[in-house]
Image (cartoon, helix red, strand yellow):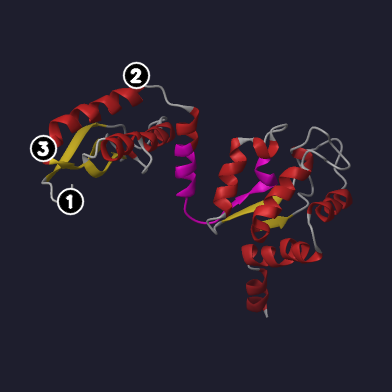
């Protein structure tokens, strides 16, 4: 293909405005169709057919109706065949080829990874029980911890449990898994005054003692309780400014 003549190829249609209630659903749909390297369009037209170095699709959202566009640089001799494949994928995402759970998870993960700024998951990301670390959300959070912009709060054991106090045994594997994977991205908190528990309040001393059970060493506890909190919230910087 390097020596092949290529042409700019595009298919378009009117799209909805930014305030459409389907905005987020359309973002996910487009990511699966042509908004990431593993998209349907790229997998078909680039990887399988070899008609292009890369194709994509996108919405141009605005105050009024915008444009939906899909296309890319296509080998000139294959433009007719490429059009057939484009239309096949457009019809497919429209309903003739149902979206799989794996596609949906990959697309959502891709969009989450693009979020700007610092992200903090409260309450260990509220992984559903009894799945815990086996729930697919855990793998997404774990990958996000690797980007250097994401943190997990080791809080709210009483919110993510079926076994309950005082040991919260079903929460222990979740906390330990986060600590083992990225102790440098974990912080602790009591979640006092526990507004979600209006009748029986958790014992803060018990919640604090859980951290000792979850962590392998004093050095790791120092990191979670002091060093990481300082890095995330800038305590040292604030103290220096105050001085």
Residue under pointer 3: 77
Left or right: 104, with 124 as reference point: left
At mark 3, the secondary structure is helix
Report the residue at 81% width, 54% height from top.
211
Q: Nearer the viewer, mark 2 or mark 1?
A: 1
- Residue at 21% x, 33% y: name it: 12
- Chain-order first, disc 2 or disc 1: 1
The crowd level at tag 2 (other Cα within 10 Å; few <14, some 14-19, many 20+) is: few
Query: Label 2 belongs to which residue?
Result: 96
Contact (CB < 8 A) between labels 2 and 1?
no
Q: Which residues are magenta?
A: 106-126
Secondary structure mainly formed by the magenta segment:
helix
In the rendered view, tell whether residue 26 sits above or below residue 74. above
Between residue 133 and residue 187, name the one nearer to us: 133
Which residue is nearer to you in this view: 22 or 9? 9
Does residue 221 appear to the left or right of 90 in the view shown? right
85 is within the stretch colored magenta: no
Residue at 80%, 38% (x, y): give it. 197
Find the distance from the CA under tag 3 to the CA under tag 2.
28 Å
Q: Secondary structure at mark 2?
A: helix
Q: CA distance from mark 2 to mark 1?
A: 34 Å
């Amino acid at each position: 293909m390097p020596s092949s003549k290529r042409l700019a190829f595009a298919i378009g249609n009117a799209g909805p405005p930014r305030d459409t209630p389907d905005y987020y659903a359309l973002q996910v749909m487009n990511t699966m169709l042509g908004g990431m390297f593993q998209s349907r369009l790229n997998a078909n037209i680039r990887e399988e057919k070899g008609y292009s170095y890369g194709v994509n699709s996108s919405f141009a959202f605005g105050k009024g109706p915008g444009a939906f566009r899909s296309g890319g640089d296509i080998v000139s001799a294959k433009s007719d065949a490429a059009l057939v494949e484009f239309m096949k994928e457009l019809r497919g995402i429209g309903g003739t080829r149902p979206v799989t759970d794996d596609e949906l998870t990959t697309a959502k993960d891709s969009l989450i990874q693009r979020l700007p700024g610092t992200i903090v998951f409260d309450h260990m990301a509220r992984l559903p029980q009894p799945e815990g670390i086996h729930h697919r959300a855990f793998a997404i959070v774990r990958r996000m911890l690797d980007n250097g912009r994401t943190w997990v709060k080791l809080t709210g054991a009483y919110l993510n449990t079926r076994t309950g106090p005082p040991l919260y045994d079903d929460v222990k594997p979740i906390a330990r898994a986060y600590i083992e994977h990225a102790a440098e991205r974990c912080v602790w908190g009591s979640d006092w005054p526990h507004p979600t528990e209006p009748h029986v309040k958790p014992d803060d001393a018990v919640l604090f003692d859980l951290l000792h059970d979850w962590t392998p060493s004093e050095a790791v506890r120092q990191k979670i309780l002091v060093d990481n909190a300082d890095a995330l919230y800038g305590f040292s910087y604030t103290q220096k400014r105050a001085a």
